[in-house]
């Protein structure tokens, strides 16, 4: 009799649990299914974006490489046209890389003024990553050593000639060369000394600075 009662109680409990499960499922099924669907859609969307991003990046990369090939072959006009198209429609970083390369092609063609203007414009464009802007300022400064004044070079790179800036060595060298070219040996000496006194200065930059310092000291034109 006891066994029968226990069996009956177990059956009732099983039925109750079964009914509770059914009720819980009816109550929470939409939420569970909805959450699962969101996960599936999210995963599919992410994979789709990855494919789209990769496909577009690949296409822009191919365009950029084709333009570089034209430039390397000396086909500057064709390279400029290809880069201009990439500047307008290029995906991701390729648009700004095309701007940089287009300015370089201008310099290679001998149009320093156009190249300087292009690099300076990139350097002032807040939509461009800071590291690219710094490189653009540096490129403009090095062109200005021959084509401009010390003040113009300074306007491009003196802000980077600080002790903690990663590009300080190139900035100081550009400023020193611009001052040297302008005949301002005292200022040139200051910049070259900052290079030689910086333990982190690349050896080739430090060697050039030391050579020019020796010339300045030998000339007696700087205290």
Image (cartoon, helix red, strand yellow):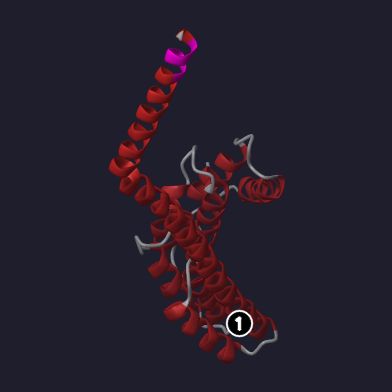
Above-or-below relation of 160 to 63 = above
Segment tinted magenta in the rendering = 3-7
The residue positioned 42% from the left and 27% from the top of the image is 14
Q: Residue furthest left?
A: 27
The residue nearer to you, when weighing 58 against 140, is: 58
- At mark 1, the secondary structure is helix
The residue nearer to you, when weighing 222 against 177, is: 177
Above-or-below relation of 25 to 14 = below
The residue nearer to you, when weighing 64 against 25, is: 25
Q: Is residue 39 left or right of residue 194?
A: left
Across and down, in percent, residue 209 comes to 64, 48
Q: Is residue 6 magenta?
A: yes
Q: Which residue is mark 1?
A: 67
Can you see residue 62? yes
| Prevailing SS of the magenta stretch | helix
Q: Residue 197 lies in what quarter of the image?
A: top right
Using a 10 Å C-alpha cutoff, classify the residue at mark 1 as few (fewer than 14 neighbours), some (14 to 19) or many (20 or more): many
Across and down, in percent, residue 214 comes to 67, 46
Above-or-below relation of 88 to 154 = below
The residue positioned 47% from the left and 83% from the top of the image is 84
Q: Residue 65 lies in what quarter of the image?
A: bottom right
Q: Is residue 154 left or right of residue 75?
A: left
Q: Is residue 140 magenta?
A: no
Number of numbered callouts drawn: 1
Can you see residue 141? no
Across and down, in percent, residue 62 comes to 62, 77
The residue positioned 43% from the left and 74% from the top of the image is 118
Above-or-below relation of 152 to 1 = below
Across and down, in percent, residue 86 comes to 49, 80
């Amino acid at each position: 009799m006891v066994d029968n009662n226990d069996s009956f109680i177990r059956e009732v409990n099983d039925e109750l649990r079964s009914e509770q499960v059914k009720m819980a499922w009816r109550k929470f099924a939409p939420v569970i299914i909805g959450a699962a669907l969101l996960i599936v859609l999210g995963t599919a969307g992410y994979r789709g974006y990855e494919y789209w991003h990769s496909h577009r990046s690949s296409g822009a990369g191919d365009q950029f490489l084709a333009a570089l090939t034209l430039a390397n072959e000396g086909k500057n006009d064709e390279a400029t046209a290809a880069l201009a198209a990439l500047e307008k429609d290029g995906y991701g970083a390729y648009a700004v890389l095309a701007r940089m390369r287009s300015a370089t092609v201008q310099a290679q063609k001998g149009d320093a003024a156009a190249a300087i203007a292009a690099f300076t414009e990139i350097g002032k464009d807040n939509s461009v990553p800071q590291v690219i802007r710094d490189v653009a300022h540096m490129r403009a400064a090095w062109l200005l050593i021959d084509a401009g004044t010390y003040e113009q070079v300074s306007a491009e790179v003196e802000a980077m000639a600080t002790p903690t800036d990663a590009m300080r060595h190139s900035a100081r060298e550009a400023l020193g060369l611009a001052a040297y070219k302008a005949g301002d040996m005292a200022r040139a000496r200051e910049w070259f000394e900052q290079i030689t006194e910086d333990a982190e200065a690349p050896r080739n930059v430090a060697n050039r600075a030391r050579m020019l310092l020796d010339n300045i000291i030998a000339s007696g034109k700087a205290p």
